[in-house]
Amino acid sequence: MRPLILIPCYDPGPRIETTVRDALAHVEGLPVWVVDDGSGRATRERLARLATEYERVQVLHHETNQGKGAAILTGIRAAQQAGFTHALTLDADGQHPSERIPAFIAAAEEQADALILGRPVFSADAPALRVHGRKVSNFWANLETVWAGIGDSLFGMRVYPIDDLIAEMEGTRWMRRFDFDPEAAVRLVWRGVTPVNVDAPVQYFDAEHNGVSHFRYGRDNRLLIWMHLRLLAGWLPRLPTLLLRRLRMKRR
């Protein structure tokens, strides 16, 4: 197993520097790659400084914004070519707890062929819309995988087996934008990759604390609805196989 940390970003503001530095501080020797998804000048300058300051930091660039999934695909393709086997993904906005990185890596080392999924632990001040809204996507993701064990379909802190993720992404034209996280989880389970859930506390930052969010409620929820409709269409022919797999798991 040869892992790296992969951070897709699009104009995250000063928070990207904290995210990268925290990731470096909590792992020894692990490379941190940032995929800049068409950010503006300020972000590029921040990333250039980080790459100059830290030998372990590498920055890849998209000239135009293509979406989170597209940024991750660029990163894992380059990582595969460089000989890496697993990618731990972090959001650039600092919501994911870097202190939990060792636990995620340890879980992946224990089950190298599994998908390590972050299961968010929300604080009392977490936005209610985010906390309760994700329950809808979680329900559909679990239905589409016959309750195979996806603890949370939207949380982006995960460890992916790179070969499996590339194979799934290159087999579809989707999974390139905000729909990436839930569709990646569902399709990898369809592929036979076992999901393993690891708890991770979530921290939300407002604008006063350099928080930046590109989430758009109407646009992104329409994208999720369309994604689940597509997945349901693919779920039906897979249903006998998925049910048989679940039956075998219960017998173990």
Image (cartoon, rainbow, N blue to C red):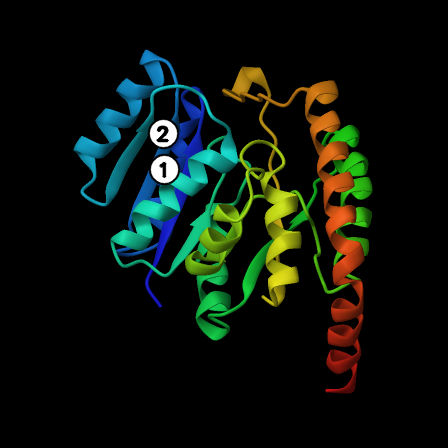
Viewer-closest of 242 and 85: 242
Identify the disc placed on residue 213.
none
Label 1 with label 2: CB-CB less than 8 Å: yes
In the image, what residue occupies the spot 82% across and 41% down? Answer: 136
Q: Quadrant of the C terminus?
A: bottom right
**Residue lying at the far bottom of the rendered structure:** 252
State left or right for residue 119 relative to residue 16. Answer: right
In the image, what residue type sits under mark 1?
A: Val
Q: Which residue is mark 2?
A: 17
Q: Which residue is mark 1?
A: 20
In the image, what residue occupies the spot 66% across and 42% down? Answer: 154
In the image, what residue occupies the spot 17% across and 31% down? Answer: 52
From this view, report whether residue 83 is shown above or below residue 184: below
From this view, report whether residue 244 is shown above or below residue 128: below
In the image, what residue type sits under mark 2?
A: Glu
**Is label 2 in a helix, a strand or a loop?**
helix
From this view, report whether residue 91 is shown above or below residue 29: above
Viewer-closest of 101 and 77: 77
